[in-house]
Image (spheres, grey):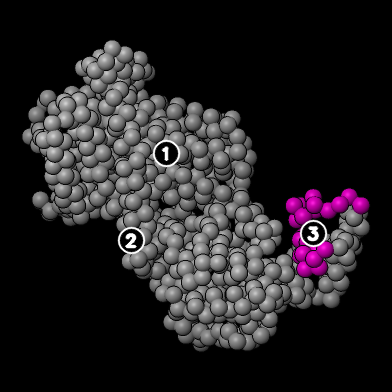
Amino acid sequence: MNMTIALAGNPNCGKTTLFNELTGSKQHVGNWPGVTVDKKEGVYRKNKEVMILDLPGTYSLSPYSAEEIVARDAIVKDRPDVVINIVDGTSVERNLYLSLQIMETGIPMVIALNMMDEVEARGDKIDCEELSELLGMPVIPVVARSGRGLQTLMEAAIAVAEEHRKPKPSEWFDNELKSTIIEIAECLGDGDLDERLWKAIKLLENDDVVAKSIEEAKADSVRKLIEVANKSMGGDVEATIADDRYQYIGKLIKQCVRKAQREHVETRSDKIDKILTNRILALPVFAAVMYVMFACTFSENFLFVEGLQSPGKWLEGMVGDLWGLFADSVSGAVEGMGASEWAVGLVTSCLDGVGSVVGFLPLVLVLFLLLSFLEDSGYMARVAFVMDRIFRHFGLSGRSFIPMLMGFGCSVPALMASRTLESDKDRKITMMITPFMSCGAKLPIYAMFAATLFTDSNQTMIVFSIYMLGIVVAIFGALILNKFAFKSDVSHFIMELPQYRVPTAKSVMIHAWEKVKGFAMKAGTVIFASTVLIWFLSNFNFSGMCDMEESLLASIGNGIKWIFAPLGWADWRASVGVVTGWIAKENIVATFGQLFGGVSDEMVEAVMAGEEALPAIGEVFNRVSAYSYMAFNLLCMPCFAAVGAIKREMGSWKWTLRAVGFQMATAYVVALLINIVGNLLF
């Protein structure tokens, strides 16, 4: 028995949480709309023959954005065996609109009434048995976060699929509208009646996609029926259909939902929002939250206590010591085996390169634990709402900030999240500026320079300022693109603000672990392969083994260093770092780890002692040029994986090259200004 079950529902109703519980997968779960932007597949952990699809959130099957089209097509075109419609029990009336639309398709369905713990906490009651009887399908109360009711839900879904139980798609419309729906369905010819009835409803709702699929011979008849219906309904059939659905939902709510008698009181979320979304306080609070997050990650004097290391710095020191012991033992073992000098050099160099990245993994872990907490709590949704006031002046809506926020994790899913935007202009601009966000792969670059060239008291501020620089440049980049490359109205911003929730430790840990695991996998594959390649290129030329200054890598670096000389770093090693960073941004640290001999404790001690001649990296960079280098790598072309995502989402190489060209030009201009102004000031 092979069976496909689709999970559908409004944004932020708990689909991905339910999917993770049923399949054991570890999809990103966030307490904000738009987390899932593509359908995900998984196998039900208790029955390997049952495939489960996690669909993007959508409010209706009349899609406006690319992600909603994915959800609509997965239901209507792919026709799963059964749909589990996740309904937020705290907002039943709004959520049931999508339920009726799915029922209209004639596909077997089960309703999962989620967040019942919150319903019970409010003192409300929902008669699931009565609602099930009225809708003609099982309605199962569940709590996806704790797993409550999921066994019963899956048993009901499998039973419904096996029975092929189909709802009646037009029973909630008034008699006049129902007869028109049936007439149009008859005009559409033979085939599945449920599908024809659904198409008839969509035609009355002015669905262009369905209209294009009608045979020309039948189009005139359908058009006449729609004209007659429009006249009889006062010229707005679409509104009449929506009104009929809501009237039917109103009857269901009246019979099945009992709200607790209580005076209107401010909820906890309302009270918190008075501060976090306040017109004056919102942005300073956001900046303060971000600063505290970076202090927890980087500060050597945490909470302004002299010598008290932040969790990130403490873990970094511990992992660095462990890696040092491991690297020394491996190098010693290789040398003890009587290996040749070049072999020992290769092993030592690779350990330095990979170790340069591994050493920063604790910082990545702490940062993403904190980011995951903010996302799951519901705060990040408020940030998008607050940023709408700013973004609107630059030609974008606040919804564009959602992909940008996801860009703090990784540019690839962030670029995919641009599908949530309805406007093609907004999608393109957002994809062009999202790589300006400091993804996790860029963090080791900042940490390397901060530890090497800046004092403890300045490290947190330096990293914080680079993150803020990405946001500021992205906003002004959007203004430039909106003024000169695109000219259209700003799209409307409508977003549901979820209730604040205390994130579960499991959800936060899964999200952070996935990021760290991705870094570790890169260190063991892409970065390791890159370090081997860099070692050969930096130790050989066409004549054989040679000094680094005469190597192939030096020749490449010397050939392009003139491009970067105006930015403050004319050394060939710095130029090579930029190029290797396009494979993966962490590669810059691995490259420097080989070419400069690693970021050693002696370097940090030299900086703290205020010595003028900084060792290794300090020989090439001063603090201004280091900041210029960080800014350039923040804003320039992202890694090849992200460029591939831009191509996939843009749909053409022309727009992809335009995006990359815009990013490279922006990076160069900003780095140039930093170098010029920085040297004038300092």
> Which residue sits at x=53%, y=57%?
40
- Please indicate, yes or no, whether residue 200 appears anywhere in the rendered image: yes
Furthest toward the front, the residue is 337
Question: Residue 627 location, x and y as percent?
Answer: 28, 32
Of residue 560 and residue 305, the one placed in the foreground of this image is 560
Q: Secondary structure at mark 3?
A: helix
Name which residue type carries label 1: Phe
Residue 200 image point, x, y percent: 81, 63
Is 286 left or right of 262, judged from the image as shown? left
The quadrant of the picture occupied by the C terminus is top left
Magenta segment includes 266:
no
Which residue position holds label 1? 436
Nearest the viewer among 197 and 345 is 345
- Residue range in magenta is 191-217
Q: Residue at x 89, y 50 (%)?
A: 216
- Please tell me which of labels 2 and 3 falls first in the chain: 3
Q: Which residue is mark 3?
A: 203
C-alpha span from label 2 to label 3: 47 Å
